[in-house]
Image: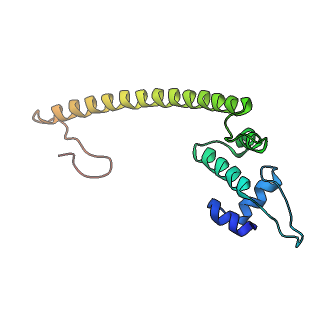
Amino acid sequence: MRIGELAARAGTTTRTLRYYESRGLLPTRRGSNGYRTYDEDDLKLLRQIRTLQDFGFELEETRPFVECLRAGHPEGDLCPASLAVYRRKLGELDALIGELQAVRAQVCEQLVKAEAARDELAAGAEVPGGPEPVCELGGRTR
């Protein structure tokens, strides 16, 4: 198949395919007419790259999976190098999850403090002569 058909079937652009070729992820073959030619194996490579990128993998992280497919394996994640990338990515994700959990705890703590301060201010407003809460965005809170 030619580059336009491959791009359409893979759900990408011809420009992306040329970029992948320049990075050595997609083989460059030309027919006797000088046009680039591709086959179903190339479509499988592109689908593997696309799936991994949808998972958040960088383009270069897809290389071991592509090389595994090129080596003739039925799936790109059957080779040791691909498994190592999965393990590394899981470590990165675990670290990010930890960071997000820490940020969530801080936001939760700040919310509790803010609600307590709001309640304290509101209680003071009920006392004659006490302050009435005012929203910083303009207007009263009640």
Q: Residue furthest left?
A: 128
7 w.r.t. 59: above or below = below
- The image shows residue 80 at horizontal and vertical percentages of 72, 29
Q: Is residue 32 left or right of residue 12?
A: right
Residue 126, x across and y down, in percent:
11, 35
Q: Nearer the viewer, residue 98 or 112?
A: 98
Q: Could you tell me residue 65's position as x and y percent?
A: 71, 40
| Residue 135 in the image: above or below residue 34 | above
Q: Residue furthest bottom?
A: 33
Residue drawn 32% across and 28% down? 113
Judging depth in this view, the residue of 68 and 140 nearest the camera is: 68
Identified at 60% across, 43% down, the residue is 56
Q: Quadrant of residue 76?
A: top right
Specify the quadrant that holds the N terminus.
Answer: bottom right
Residue 4 horizontal side relative to residue 121, left or right: right
State the scheme by which the image is colored: rainbow
Above or below residue 86? Residue 3 is below
Percent across and percent down for residue 4 are 71, 69
The residue shown at (25%, 34%) is: 118
Picture quadrant where residue 108 is located: top left
The mark total stands at 0
**Residue drawn at point x = 62 percent, y = 44 percent:** 52
